[in-house]
Each structure stands twice: as structure tokens, then as C-alpha cells.
Image (cartoon, rainbow, N blue to C red):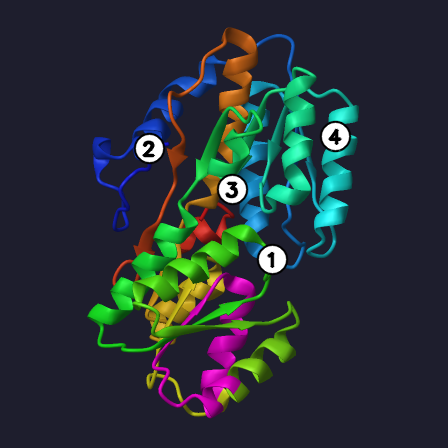
Amino acid sequence: MRRRNRFDFPPAGGKRLAAALVTALGLLVSGLAHAEGHRFVMVTHGVPSDPFWTVVKNGADAAAHTLGDTLEYRAPSTFDMAKMQQLAEAAIASDPDGLILSFTDESALGKVVQNATDRGIPVITINSGGDAAAKYGALLHVGQSEYAAGKAAAERMRKMGVEKGLCVNHEQGNQGLDQRCDGFIDGFDGNAEQLATSYDPTEIRNAIVAYLNQHRDIKGVLTLGAVTAGPLIQAMRDEGATGKLTLATFDLSPAILLALQQGALDFAIDQQQYLQGYLPVVFLDQYVEHGLLPADDVATGPGFVTKENAARVMELSRRGIR
């Protein structure tokens, strides 16, 4: 499948498909609502404590409301592929008009997608695993190339003078996050390492401090979401190390944007998760109504947010859009 080129935030007008779609949808979506709404189910691996997925859900809810559709959002309380598989299978059994799925584990979810498509339920994947899901009949993927995003983060750090990096993975086994670390390590030509953690903020903080104390040659640290970026920032403050390492994270939140403004983080990788919720609902609606579908996957990232442009997206982040 073709992949979009990465862009620096903000995307440049009509040169990027995701930006063009946002503009077009903003003009046209109000006219798409129909008398009889459809019912779509979104199943993700996102845990309630991760603000990333709140924004995804906000986007999906907004699209469903505008179109007169019903959107049911389901996710496990912890990162649990077995539970997510059960939720997806239950969604299929309810015979929705379409299924939206974060395809984080091919072994757990491949047969689920195949089951849905065999029953005539259209599937669009988001966030992770688009290439793999296509093998099982998924129509389209909305997200970013996780490997390319991780590699781009490493390349950016190297330009900032970092010679060795660390990727902190809070969901090892999530193929999307694993791909981020793989890209990051390859971007350093192998001169980077991976640290697996849990979701617990105290455990994350302690693990990062212990690892950095034992590996003094690491000068750049990448976390894979706001859930781990917070403990990293706190660890640097507690140890008096703020400004001594290059720090970056995937994804945005009000706290992440504030840290960027204050110089506690050097950059964040933005994949515009609101669109990962919004666009699949619109695409499924039009597919069910008219058989219309984009010809290729839709790349919503990666883009980079830094101290220089953080203020521009902070208000949208407070509103649950960025």
C-alpha cells in the first residue's frame, strides 16, 4: 500500500490528503445526514487512563452526531488483547452496520476482522496495523505509519545532537507501539535501546530513573504516549536533570503542550487522533449509503509539535480535539 510522506506540523494546505479531507468534510458533512441513521461500533485497546483515546472517541461521537448515526465505543479497562477480542466478537454478533477497530495484534484480531467481513460487515481500522488488517478484508486504515513515525523521531533527535536513544514502551506486545520503537532504533542505526514498563506512573518513573542511571550514554528519550511522558517529565524534575537530555513523546494532551511550552519536552509527535475517530465514521456512513470510499489509506500523521507552535493547538487540546 502507498504511504503518505510525513509532514511537519501544521500540514500544508492541499498537499496532504488528511488536510484536504478535513477542509472538504467541514464544507460538506452537514449535508450528509440522512433520515435513517446507521449503527457503528468502535472497539479499541485504549485504556480509560489514556487521554489519547478520549480524543479519538470525541471525534467519532462528533461525526456520528452530525450524520445522525449511532456510535458505540467499547474498550477494555486494561491493555488486554483477549478482552478486546471478546469485545470485538460481541460487536460483530450484534450485527452493526460497520466496525471500526484499532488493529493492535494480528494474531488476536485477524480472525475477528475476517469474521466481520465474511458476514458482510465493513471494517475500517484505525491507529495500528492497517497493512496487516488489509489481509483479512479491512476496507481502509486511518492513522500513521508507526515505524516511519518512530524513525522520524530518531532522525530529529540525531539532528539535535543525540547519539544514543531510549524508547520507553508501556504496552510491549502492542504491534503499533513495538513498531514505533523498531523505527526509533533503526533511525539510530541500532544505537538505541528499548525499556518495557507498565501503565503505573510510579513504576514508569522509577524504571526510567534506574535505567538512565545504569546507562549514562543515553542522551535522548522517547515515550510512546502521554501516559508515560508525564512520569518521564516528573523524573527529570525530581533528579534535577531537566534540560540535560533530549525528551520527546508521541501524542498530545494539555499537559504535554504545557510541558512543550515550558521546555520540559523538546517535541511531540502528533497523529491527529481526533481524525482517527471522526473520519472512519464518515467513511463508513458513505460506504453504507452510497458505496463510496477513499482509494487509499488516510495518513493522519506524523507531524511535530514543538515549543514554537504548541500554543497554537493548546486551546483545541483543552476542548478534546487535539
Name the N-terminal-most of marks 2 and 1: 2
Q: Badge 4 is on which residue?
A: 91
> Within 10 Å of the Cα at label 3, are there few (<14), some (14-19), or many (20+) other Cα atoms?
many
Say which amino acid is labelled 4.
Ala
Relative to 283, is 5 on the left or the right?
A: left
Name the N-terminal-most of marks 2 and 3: 2
Task: Say which element carries label 1.
Answer: loop
Q: Badge 2 is on which residue?
A: 2
> Within 10 Å of the Cα at label 4, are there few (<14), some (14-19), or many (20+) other Cα atoms?
many
The circle drawn on residue 129 is 3
Which residue is rendered at x = 39% and y = 24% of the image? 25
Q: Is residue 228 magenta?
A: yes
In the image, which residues are magenta? Answer: 211-237
Instruction: Nearest to the eye among marks 4 and 3: give it.
Output: 3
Name the N-terminal-most of marks 3 and 1: 3
Q: Is residue 82 magenta?
A: no
Q: Position of residue 218 (x, y in %)?
A: 37, 82
The circle drawn on residue 173 is 1
Task: Say which element carries label 2.
Answer: loop
The answer to whether residue 241 of the structure is visible from this angle is: yes
Say which amino acid is labelled 1.
Gly
**Mark 4 → mark 1, Cα distance in angstroms:** 23 Å
**Mark 2 → mark 3, Cα distance in angstroms:** 14 Å
